[in-house]
Amino acid sequence: MAEYKYLTVSLTNKEIEHIFSKIIIDSNDPLGKCWIWSSTIRKRGYGRVRYRSHTESIHRLIYAWLIAPIPRGRYGDIPTLDHMCENPPCCNPFHLRLVSNWENGMRGNSVAAINARKTHCLRGHLLPIEPNDCTGKQRVCKICAAEYRKSHSEKAREYMRQYQQDHRDALLIYIHAYYRNHREVLLEHKREYRRTHKHQGPS
């Protein structure tokens, strides 16, 4: 496995003063409430700042400075920095936590995340904790699945009965018509068969 590249931060007094001049901190509860970045904001609400000729997310920079260096990248087994306060402009390091990409995604509002948080199906039945479908990726309600299989099998049996009935009638109609049109030929075949097998007993 390739080694991680880390964001490490060491701020000078001038850089600290510049950065914190753009952060709104509640003096009555500096560690409990969000530190709001009031400068440049990305489309998704995350603050950004220039640091040593590079653009960095402000919450990542503050975390790397006050808590610990952060692995760079967003794929594979590289952890990501998650806002536990769910407030993107916040850069309070006590509101941030390094988590796996999967855990970070499950805290979001994607379809997969919403489904993963569900505890009951649409009919109110309790969903299994672990994936239980044929692919091993989804949680399927056992009660609804059993009811569906029962209903589907009954409909399938009824369809087959009706199909056989319809085709049996059509086959009988065809046989009767064929017999009427080829009666003499069939009778001759029948007589020839009897003559051929008249003196042959069972083997």
Image (cartoon, rainbow, N blue to C red):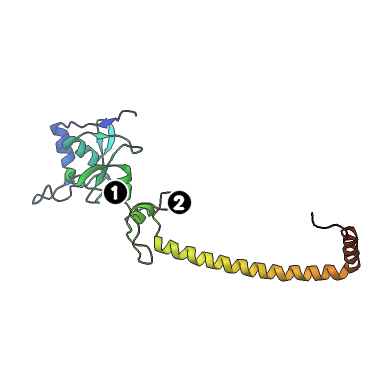
Amino acid type, callout 1: Gly
Q: Residue at x 57, y 66 (%)?
A: 157
In the image, residue 14 above or below residue 197: above
Q: Which residue is drawn at 43% across and 53% down?
A: 133
What residue is shown with label 2?
134
Q: Using the image as rendered, state which of residue 17 and residue 164 is in the foreground.
A: 164
What residue is shown with label 1?
45
Answer whether labels 2 and 1 touch (C-beta < 8 Å): no
Percent of width and height locating residue 143? 40, 63
In the image, residue 108 above or below residue 1: below
Q: Using the image as rendered, state which of residue 62 and residue 195 is in the foreground.
A: 195
Amino acid type, callout 2: Cys
Which image quadrant for residue 57? top left
Residue 133, numbered circle? none
Percent of width and height locating residue 182? 88, 67
Q: Using the image as rendered, state which of residue 180 and residue 61 is in the foreground.
A: 180
Question: Looking at the image, which residue sits at the far left?
Answer: 28
Percent of width and height locating residue 117? 32, 56
